[in-house]
Image (cartoon, grey):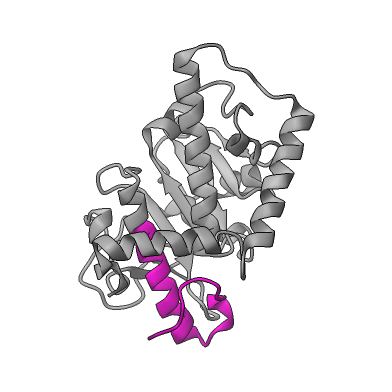
Amino acid sequence: MNLPLTGIDVYALPPDQGEWVLRRQLAAAYRLVDHFGWTELIYGHLTARVPGEALHFLINPYGLNYDEVTASNLVKIDVDGRIVEPTNYPVNHAGFVIHSAIHMANSARHKVVMHTHTRAGMAVCALEEGLLPISMVSTGFTGRLSHHDYEGPSLDLDERQRLQANLGDNQAMLLRNHGLLATGRSVPEAFLRLWRLERACQIQVDAAAAGRLRVLDDAVARKSGAGIDSFSEKESKVGIGDLEFAALLRKLDKTDPQWRH
């Protein structure tokens, strides 16, 4: 299939075509998480709602490294994490509890959910004050970042209601003492939001280690955040993240294009 992977709304395509484009986008996102060093062995998930009427989602095969994920080996599951199409791979059923909660909260805004356990992300999630507006990239989350208290490994389905309530209208959340979560209407949008959240955490950890933090005034932080979003929307083709994701796809293709298959 020669359809482009950016500048396209996968949910406006016929379901079969849309799913294949989505599979390639999501496989690329897994490879990029590996490229940036955001993995924690085989754990963590990036999930995406499959086009069509059924509540089906794509998730990574459990046990594979992120740099082994391809478009074709992504596993299709339902909202309870059950496999719905033949596959040679298992899935981490318990790991989908968080993702299913967010997907169910508002499918239009949360078609894609990305959750990582990075060193900087987990460090900021362990701070009482959480993420602070100390850099341009962090201001994008001022007044737009939710928090969810740690309840242990997410094995209980009743936690889904609390996850939904705590996320509210936002598309990014600190899972306290746990990790980062970002959502989007597309893979490019969710990935860019995750990248910005991770970068904001890295900057805060580095700055705190170097000296006293200079926290921006709330009004300045909110103005900065609104400007960042406005710029991203103006520069995009279909949605936020298109330009950045297209550039990252070119980077992937230079090293290992097998993610496309």
**Residue 255 quadrant:** bottom left
Is 7 placed left or right of 170 in the picture? left
Q: Is-magenta flag for residue 17?
A: yes
Is 105 placed left or right of 198 in the picture? right
Q: Nearer the viewer, residue 234 or 198?
A: 234
Main structural element of the magenta stretch: helix, strand or loop?
Answer: helix
Q: Nearer the viewer, residue 153 or 131?
A: 131
Quadrant position of the N terminus in the picture: bottom left
Q: Is residue 115 visible?
A: yes
State the residue at coordinates (25%, 57%): 67
Is 221 placed left or right of 198 in the picture? right
Where residue 95 appears, as percent x and y from the top left, is: 38, 51
For this orientation, the residue located farthest to the right is 219
Where residue 35 appears, as percent x and y from the top left, is: 31, 50
**Where 248 falls versus 49 (above or below)?**
above
State the residue at coordinates (52%, 52%): 192
Q: Is-magenta flag for residue 65?
A: no
State the residue at coordinates (36%, 48%): 44
Which contiguous range is marked in magenta?
A: 1-30
Where residue 229 appears, as percent x and y from the top left, is: 68, 50
Q: Is residue 125 visible?
A: no
**Where 165 falls versus 17 (above or below)?**
above
**Where 186 falls versus 227 (above or below)?**
below
